[in-house]
Amino acid sequence: MQPRRVRAMARAFRRSPLLIAFALGSLLVALTPWLGMASTGPGGRGPTPPPGPVPFDQQTAQQSPHHGVAPANAMEPMAPVLDRTGWTATASDEETAKENGRAANVLDGDAATLWHSRWSGTPAPLPHSITVDMHRTTVVSALVYQPRKDSPHGRVGQYSISVSTDGRNWGSPVGTGTLADDTAAKTLAFAPQGARFVKLTAVTEAGNRGPWSSAAELNLLGDPGTPAATVDLPRTGWTATASDEETAKENGRAANVLDGDAATLWHSRWSGTPAPLPHSITIDMHRTAAVSALVYQPRKDSPNGRAGAYTVTTSTDGTTFGAPVASGTWRDDDTVKTATFTRAANARYIRLTVTREAGNRGPWTSAAEIRLSGPANPAAHGSWSRITGFPLVPVATAVLPGDKLLAWSAYAVDRFGGSNGYTQTAILDLKTGKVTQRRIDNTGHDMFCPGIAMLADGRVLVTGGSNAEKASIYDPATDAWSATADMNIARGYQAMTLLSTGEAFVLGGSWSGATGDKSGEVWNPATRTWRKLAGVPATPAMTADPRGAYRADNHMWLYATSGGKVLQLGPSKQMHWITTGGNGSLTSAGNRADSQDAMTGNAVAYDVGKLLTLGGSPAYENTPATRRAYTVSITGGQVQAARTGDMGHARAFGNSVVLPDGKVAVFGGQAHPVPFSDATSVLTPELWDPATGRFTPLASMAVPRNYHSVANLLPDGRIFSGGGGLCGDCATNHSDGAVFTPPYLLKADGSPKPRPVITGDVPPRAAAGTSLTVGTEGAVASFVLMRASAATHSTDNDQRRIPLTSKATGAGTYEVALPADKGVVLPGTYMLFALDAQGVPSIARFVTVT
């Protein structure tokens, strides 16, 4: 038999019993009346009150015709559900007098039994905690919390998660957050690590109904293939050998796993008499290094030889290999797999041994590529904070003054569909880490898949999406939402930008509303009305997506310049100049060098008139993404594009953020874009340096960030990265985020570098062309304005970095000049950073430029 020629077998749909239980539970919730508090206490099952409004988590909506069903692998978590055999659970307190509310009930497989904090007599006060002891150390990456179904009492609201190897030393929490007040199972992710004990602490009750906590079931997820605080090791000089390899009927040599080409592969010997399992392949790094994980990429052309059961061992001499540092079973698909080590190993040789083929198709083993990861150096690779849970999937975000981050999803916290006229929102307080949730009804607008523009006065304009003609405004000064005039053209997935005139421009958006030429229009803040631009059709700016306008006019990259003009520089390979006066006009600005269409890539303004474009793919989905990046420079009316260094990884659905020092960080994305899937996730962020044109790897992410993910620069110079999913009862919903600290803020030991400090008051408002007097602690090298921005669907047209001219006027006092051209400094809210000579930024002060 020739395994490379064997037709791929259809993979049977597989779902764990846990996920089936969760899905059935969600269905039952939609069909079962809401049950209230019994007269005997919070744990009782007393009479049902008269029915009231249906809670949002039980409401149904007509699925939008514009999205396909989530792929089968979206229903399966990247991490395996760990076997609970032999586990035990204990709690800070439990109810035993008036009901069986013992901690052990969370491990019995019966969602009808539950742990409940002590409520009879004098209730035990919050917080309450419950601890799972696995009685063995293993890699764990998430806690799955199933609320009780029979009553809302005791649902966990604010929470924290801690882990321990001995049950005594816990350290700082590995995850914190706030959960939605509903019955859906919650996956509370954290950075993968070896642990025996996992503790869930309930800080508040979700509905503030009383001092109670409860849980029906708790499960833990294992190694998701995203090791914490690691970075790809360079493979220069490495060699590979195998226990056996196919050389007679194909080039299946071990060396192919190190050549950077996923089309070539190592294959165990299959011609003649196949070599029996197990098979092993050994990487010799020719130097000793700390290694934390092995990354295995299966072949793409056939399922034969996919690694199933495996172990990883290490050696310093190539002869003596110790006990396994990782073991497990990989599922039978073509997604990239990672074996996270229970401990970092100092080794020269790393051996992967495969004892079973994933699909039991034969005695074969194959691999397209193998990579190794080691501990990250904070000063070179940055570091990640603990994961913060949100009560919704943050599909769209906007940075607000007062150290706040606004986020929203759709009509529901974890799914979209229909045009329901309301939106679930949340605000993260960056100082405290607390998240508050609110449903917005008053604008009649389901703001899923919108266009966003940060207005001149600091408000946030949100247009279209599920309610395709609607437009809403959020005012951070009053924390209030209001409606503005409907657009002339119903849209979803449209692009927006503020203009130098203070107006807002929108183009494209055939995802929602009638598919067709979604020509441009402009919103006037004085009249709060929209004006159509007959001279700005969307058709010339479309990509050649095979699905036509519905996908071809989405998520355009827009850069506003002087005189109300806009450069449309992607994702289509052809660029255009747009004028917005009168009926407007659209004229060619040439091609983006040799780039192809790059849908779901993005563009970032890293300097005045200078942009970087990154990744994307020729079509919206199911086409290979690109590693390519380009610079686009604007001089007057001339546009010049050039290819810069390639990223280390191909990405679509990624997010990019410009930093105060002018470097650009890119997060997440997929090598092969598929909405709602976490397959082919890129977990290594990268940093582009405009001085060299090169990308360097950053510390790996703990959670995939793909379709419906976001990233934003924060006022302290760090970056928020979060979201992904929004596909209902799927395993790829990521209701969380984490803050990345770039290397410019850290020493090698992970401690913070000294930072410049802006002292005194910075005026809240300043006119373009004027100067600011800024005080600092000691000398600084430069100042920069970073526009407060909003992100959704990999696009953030509000990002803009503006280096400022400054001069010292005294000890620690500077006169900082603002550009006079509003095409350079668009009206709106900015973060003012001071930087030292090494590019270390201060904490920013907010200023609105008028």
Image (cartoon, helix red, strand yellow):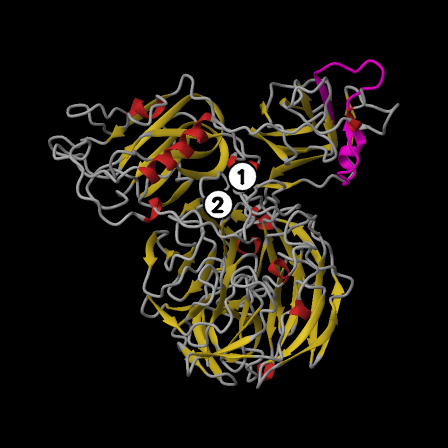
Residue occupying image coordinates x 57% and y 53%: 743
When the figure is inspected, residue 510 is found, relative to residue 375, above or below; the finding is below
Is 397 inside the magenta-drawn segment? no
Going by the image, does 729 lie left or right of 199? right
Query: What amino acid is at disc 2?
Result: Cys
Disc 1: CA contacts within 10 A as few (<14), some (14-19) or many (>=20): many
Going by the image, does 181 lie left or right of 456? left
Give residue 727's mark. 2
Residue occupying image coordinates x 48% and y 39%: 730
Residue situated in front as seen by the camera: 10 or 227: 10
In which image quadrant can residue 562 be found?
Answer: bottom right
Disc 2, SS: loop
The magenta stretch is: 254-282
Q: Horizontal and vertical percent for residue 86? A: 41, 16
Q: How far, Cα to Cα, is label 1 from label 2?
A: 8 Å
Q: Horizontal and vertical percent for residue 625? A: 69, 50
Q: Are marks 1 and 2 in contact (CB under 8 Å)?
A: yes
Is 262 inside the magenta-drawn segment? yes
Residue occupying image coordinates x 51% and y 48%: 724
Would you name the residue on which mark 1 appears?
74
Residue situated in front as seen by the camera: 143 or 248: 248
In which image quadrant can residue 637 be found?
Answer: bottom right
Disc 1, SS: helix
Q: Is residue 291 visible?
A: no
Query: What amino acid is at disc 1?
Result: Ala
